[in-house]
Amino acid sequence: MAEILAECAGVRRVFGRFTAVDGVDLAVGPGEVVGLLGGNGAGKTTLIRMLLGLLPVSAGEVRLFGRPPSRASRRRVGYLPQGLGLYDDLTIAENLAFSRAVFGGASGGASGGAGGGAGGAAAGPDPLRRYAGLSVRDLPLGVARRAAFAQVLAHAPDLLLLDEPTSGVDPLARARLWETISQAAGDGAGAIVTTHHMEEAEECTRLVVLAAGRVVAAGTAAQITGQARTAVVRAADWAAALRRLEAAGLRAVLAGTLLRVPGRPAAEVAAVLADLPARVSTEPATLEECFFELAAAG
């Protein structure tokens, strides 16, 4: 049986009267990329910090490589916080050298190929080579994120914990960072990635959706969307149709000249539009539409 790299069992975290994480179960094994989805305040970062042992749990249990988080188990983890985890006054090479000194070189774990490749890439190919002499504070955000990835992978971790790793970068840089995540998983590392980008969720092996600190859905993207349907409005005057739907309290999203009304049956939408010249049909719901419905219900 494959080793469970990280596991949460009934984990809860309370700050005063506020419950940030409420009874979450989560596990990741080698080669898996688990997407942790949720809006701001859903509990994603708190859960990551508890997995690392940086925050104590209020209830439940957290395990890294089968044991409670410790300094020894964290040596097998590559953690990328939202703030990147780089020293602003050091160059890329200096940050990597510091990281290797802290971790004592490659761990020789399952993801050794991914870590070695990323570490080498940081010193060699563009765009990082062009910025080799600059302090991190002077780097473009996309380059800084790539450098942070290189540092995270430099010690060949067996588990990646990546908190909003592509936040603020352009689509091309985002795609390259996801190639790095996929390569690490292909070489045997497990990964937990927090994100609110639904296109990134499609890159994950499976998903866990959080809302108000609770798991409201889990499974593959196909399992989460399931048989969900969305009402689609084709109207002669989409602006008038949108105003009518909003006045009735129905959330509609403009897609080209079509209006999509997730979570509502076509008959209800058609009744609201009443005398307006419009045709209402249904189509399979997208993952993003299901996510917003789940988050609202949570």
Image (cartoon, rainbow, N blue to C red):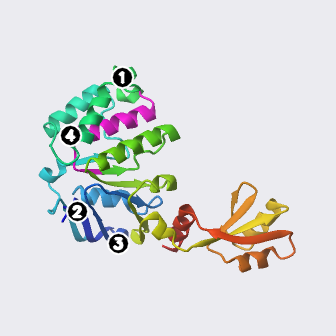
Are the residues at dot 3 and dot 4 in contact (C-beta closer than 8 Å)? Answer: no
Say which mark, if any, is on residue 155.
Answer: 4
* In this view, the mark in front (1 or 2): 1
Say which amino acid is labelled 4.
Answer: His
Determine which residue is flagged by label 2: 56
Distance between the Cα atoms at labels 4 and 2? 26 Å
Badge 1 density bin: few <14, some 14–19, many ≥20, Cα 10 Å: some
Question: Magenta part of the protein: which range?
Answer: 139-160
Determine which residue is flagged by label 1: 129
* In this view, the mark in front (3 or 4): 4
User: Does label 3 or label 2 sit earlier along the sequence?
Assistant: 3
Residue 138 to residue 69: above or below: above
Badge 3 density bin: few <14, some 14–19, many ≥20, Cα 10 Å: many
Say which amino acid is labelled 1.
Answer: Arg
Distance between the Cα atoms at labels 1 and 2? 40 Å
Residue 248 to residue 207: above or below: below
Magenta-span inclusion, residue 254: no
User: Does label 4 or label 2 sit earlier along the sequence?
Assistant: 2
Distance between the Cα atoms at labels 1 and 3? 44 Å
* In this view, the mark in front (1 or 3): 1
Snapshot quadrant of residue 228 = bottom right
Residue at horizontal 24 percent and vertical 60 percent from the top: 6
Distance between the Cα atoms at labels 3 and 4? 33 Å
User: Does label 1 or label 3 sit earlier along the sequence?
Assistant: 3
Say which amino acid is labelled 2.
Answer: Pro
Distance between the Cα atoms at labels 3 and 2? 14 Å
Residue 154 to residue 14: above or below: above
Determine which residue is flagged by label 3: 22
